[in-house]
Each structure stands twice: as structure tokens, then as C-alpha cells.
Image: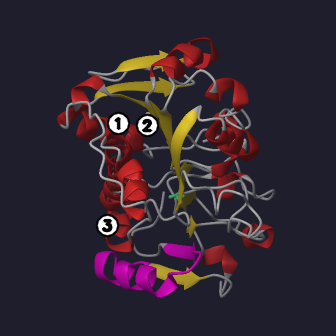
Amino acid sequence: MLKEDKTVMLLRTDTRDQAWIDAFSVTMPELEVRLWPETGDRSEINCALLWGPPPELFDELDNLEVIFSIGAGVDSLLTCQTLPAHLPIVRMVESELTAGMVEFCLFHVLRFHRLMHLFEKHRVERRWEDLTQVPASEVTVGIMGIGVLGQALARQLSALRYQVIGYRRGPGDVDDMEVFRGVDQFETFMRRSEILVALMPSTPETKKLINCRTLSWLPPGACFINAGRGDLVDEEDLVSALDGRRLAGAALDVFKTEPLPQESPLWTHPDVYITPHIASITHPPTACRYIADVIGRHRLGEPWPHLVEIGRGY
Ligand code: GLV
């Protein structure tokens, strides 16, 4: 059990160290935060908040009790060979991270549904053409990955009257949503998805789930939004699907290799929108409140919430 008087957190972020330190000093002033690689006496460290830990980070952390993931996705932790997999790993579930993801996906769903990607091209050509628009209630948005983020997106899309369907690999229903499950139902899900939103994690099972075969199942003129992980997609197949007009547009925030290599054909493809993995970023103030709440509940004897299941890969 994390001690009330001496909880020492090892922090390893990607870029925003000071924002985290400031947020913890407001939310958990009693917490001692040590910024990697300045660990001090490693035996005093009992929790860690991490993104992309180097393998040597876990050396001699003999009293580590819990690991918090900075990201919603935990692949940067699970690919670390030295990860102490017997410890609880708590996923980041915080309100601003969720809100950011919902905003990003809504923005692109609205763009594709209201044909803004086409009107943008027409403007360049000075072409005045009234394209036929359909109401949101006649557009089906398929969400791959219906965890916390996918469900939050589904609620907002439903409020805008879109038809929303969901796909997940494992079991589990979601209130008020038609859910397709497992490999058997993936084709039916894809055939219905006029706008496909990928929010799935990177696992061995999700690698290249979006490929020429599965893209061929989408309705003609479908659009694709990827805010999950880049390796869900076979990028060459995606470009072929766009070139062959099987796909009308793609908004990509994540890529097989990041930063996206200069030579990638995606950069210059006229039907692709690119953002540099910014769909949603964990916001330290709200994230620290989440961590404070989780630690507080743990001290009252409650189980750790949102635990990563190593076997399933997320
Ligand atoms: C970002 O990619 C995250 O996992 O939070």
C-alpha cells in the first residue's frame, strides 16, 4: 500500500516535465516527484508515471508498487523489455484527454460528412458547385475501439444524430450502440461504416487490420480517420485505396513511423490530412487530479482502476 507520508514518484515524460511537476505541486503537494534520470535512492521510489521508459529505468526499483501510464495508449510501456509486468499498470483516463480526442474526431467526421474536403478543392479551382449533402441521421460512423474514448465519441456523434456503430475485438456490450465483435463480425462492421474512425490500441492482433482486403469492404466513397495507432494500418494499401477512389479521404494523426518520413507519399496525397500525433494529449492538471484520486481510493482499500491486461496487450 502506498504510504501516506512517503510516496515517491519517478516521472519520465516525453517533453513537458515542468508542466507535470507544477501540476503535482498543486494537486499532491505531499508527493515527492523525482524526474528521470535523477532517481536519488531508488529503493525509496514506490510509484512511477511513465511514457516510453528506457530499459534501465526499472533497474533496482525494488519497492515499486504501481505504474501509471502517461498516455491513453500503453504500447510505449509494454514494448519495454524490462517492464515489471507483475505490477499493476494503470491506464490514463482523464477528462481533457477524452475531450481532446472527441474534438479531433468530431472535427474530421464533420469535415467528411459535410464534404468540406471537396469544397476546399473546389475553392482552389474557383468552382461553384452545389454538391448534394445528406443529413447526419443518414450517415453511419463506425468506431473501431469502443473503450473510454470511443464511447465518449459515440455519445457526441449520437447527439449530432449520426448513426453510430462500434467494433471491438473482445466481448462486452455498450448501451445504446450496435456493437460488432471479433474477427467474424469485422466485415459486416466495415461494410456499414461510411466514416470509419480507428481508436484501437497497438497490439499483435490489431497490426495492419486496415489493409487492402478490409478497406475493400467499406462502402464506396467512405472516409477514414485514424487517431489510434499507426500500425493498425498498412500504409501502402491505404494509399492504393485512395488512389483507386475506394476511399474518398483520410485524416491521419498516427503513423507506422513517427515522425512521418519525408519520403512518405502520404505527405503529398491530395486526399490525406496529416497531423503530428496531436489528436489528444494528456493534460497534466487534470491527469494529476486523476492520479491523486486513484491513489486516495487505493489507500482506502479500493482496487486499482483501468488496469492494463498484459496478455491482451492493452
Ligand atoms: C497518445 O497517443 C496517448 O496514448 O495518449
Three-letter amino acid code at the position of disc 2: Gly
Mark 2: secondary structure: loop
Identified at 38% across, 78% down, the residue is: 24
Rendering coords of residue 5 (x, y %)? 41, 75
Rendering coords of residue 129 (x, y %)? 30, 46
User: Which of the two residues, 66 or 116, is positioned nearer the viewer here?
Assistant: 116
Crowd class of label 2 (few under 14; some 14 to 19; many from 20; radius 10 Å): some
Crowd class of label 3 (few under 14; some 14 to 19; many from 20; radius 10 Å): some
Query: Is ligand 1 less than 8 Å from the beta carbon at label 1?
Result: no
Identified at 42% across, 26% down, the residue is: 166
Task: Please state the extent of the stretch shown in magenta in the rendering.
Answer: 8-31
- First in residue order: circle 1 vs circle 3: 1
Q: Are marks 2 and 1 in contact (CB under 8 Å)?
A: yes
Mark nearest the camera among 1 and 3 is 1
Residue 109 counted in the magenta span: no
Asked if residue 180 lies left or right of residue 82, the reply is: left
Identified at 71% across, 39% down, the residue is: 240
User: Can residue 105 be seen at all in this image of the molecule?
Assistant: no
User: Which of the two residues, 69 or 217, is positioned nearer the viewer here?
Assistant: 217
Q: In the rendered view, would you say 258 is above or below 131?
A: below
Three-letter amino acid code at the position of disc 3: Thr
Give the labeled residue for mark 2. 147
Give the labeled residue for mark 1. 151
- First in residue order: circle 2 vs circle 3: 2
Three-letter amino acid code at the position of disc 1: Gln
Asked if residue 46 lies left or right of residue 115, the reply is: right
- Where residue 121 sits, quadrant-wise, is bottom left
Asked if residue 158 lies left or right of residue 170, the reply is: left
Identified at 67% across, 66% down, the residue is: 52
Query: Is ligand 1 less than 8 Å from the beta carbon at label 3?
Result: no
Rendering coords of residue 221 (x, y %)? 49, 31
Give the labeled residue for mark 3. 286
